[in-house]
Amino acid sequence: MRILAIDTSNRPLSVAVLDDTTVLAAITVTVHQKHAEYLLPEIERLLAMADLKPADLDRIVVAAGPGSYTGIRIAVTTAKVLATTLNIELVTVSSLVTLAANVPVEGALVAPIFDARNQNVFAGLYRIQNGRPVAVIADAHMDVTAFLTAVQEYAEPVWFLGDADHFADLIATTISAATPQVSPWLDLPQVATIGLLGATMTPVKDVDRLVPNYLRLTQAEAEWRAKNPGEDTTSYVEKI
């Protein structure tokens, strides 16, 4: 199975192509955030490096959030268009899971964190079982102190990844168990891992209805709800 993996859910733009478990080519760019401008050219360059054409692909695997609103939309939209036009399978993977999978220590607790600003985070807690992350605390958008308090209940060493360095002092004062030091590269999603995770997952049944996993309201939704209290179950899109 030939798989194209895509992740633009945060600062890095990462794409890889795999043939089963063999990584044929991978590209990660961290020096710009113009994902809309660079994603398709990088996919084209990636396939050329692997001597493949789009028609040679069997499956798309995309990191569908949480993360940057714009970044997630770009990746998911691109993945949907490719899957539809090529008539191939599409699989979504949590952007937090892709970081947790960077830790190859069986039984380890891993807490991937993305800074969501204003002392909020996108975060989850995973235990590595049989080489794969299994959710212990589900992905959520929450106050960082509340998340760390929940993690502390496990009283075990925890691998903090992603934007954890933004909250280093708070982690040090909240988590009593010693936490392993990690190499900086572990804080970046390894796009080949996204492909490997997605290789055994169930494809999306209805590609057209797939939406990103934002884990919080978009700005438009939040503003609409603020102006229309008590109408949370009503669509904020006006029909004309």
Image (cartoon, rainbow, N blue to C red):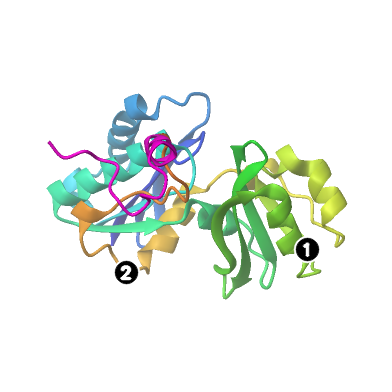
Query: What residue occupies the far bottom of the structure in this picture?
Result: 130
Residue at the image position 73 percent from the left and 56 percent from the top: 148
Residue at the image position 77 percent from the left and 68 percent from the top: 153
User: Rounded to the nearest whole Å, what is the CA distance between mark 1 and mark 2?
Assistant: 33 Å
Residue 102 position by quadrant:
bottom right
**Element at badge 2?**
loop
Residue at the image position 66 percent from the left and 71 percent from the top: 106
Q: Position of residue 14 (x, y in %)?
A: 44, 40
139 with respect to 183 (left or right): left
- Mark 2 sits on what residue? 202
Amino acid type, label 2: Thr
Write down the region rendered in magenta: 220-240
- Label 2, residues with CA under 10 Å away: few <14, some 14-19, many ≥20: few
Q: In this view, does 121 lie above or below 194?
A: above
Q: Nearer the viewer, residue 20 or 100?
A: 100
Residue at the image position 61 percent from the left and 51 percent from the top: 142
Residue 125 position by quadrant:
bottom right
- Label 1, residues with CA under 10 Å away: few <14, some 14-19, many ≥20: some
Q: Position of residue 216 (x, y in %)?
A: 47, 47
Query: Which quarter of the rendered picture does the N terminus lie within?
Result: bottom left
Residue 152 tag number: 1
Amino acid type, label 1: Gln
Query: Which quarter of the rendered picture does the C terminus lie within?
Result: top left
139 with respect to 210 (left or right): right
Q: Is residue 143 above or below residue 198?
A: above
Q: Nearer the viewer, residue 181 or 53?
A: 181
Q: Position of residue 189 (x, y in %)?
A: 53, 46
Type of secondary structure dominating the magenta stretch: loop
Q: Where is residue 222 in the image (x, y as percent from the top left)?
A: 43, 39
**Element at badge 1?**
helix
Residue 107 tag number: none
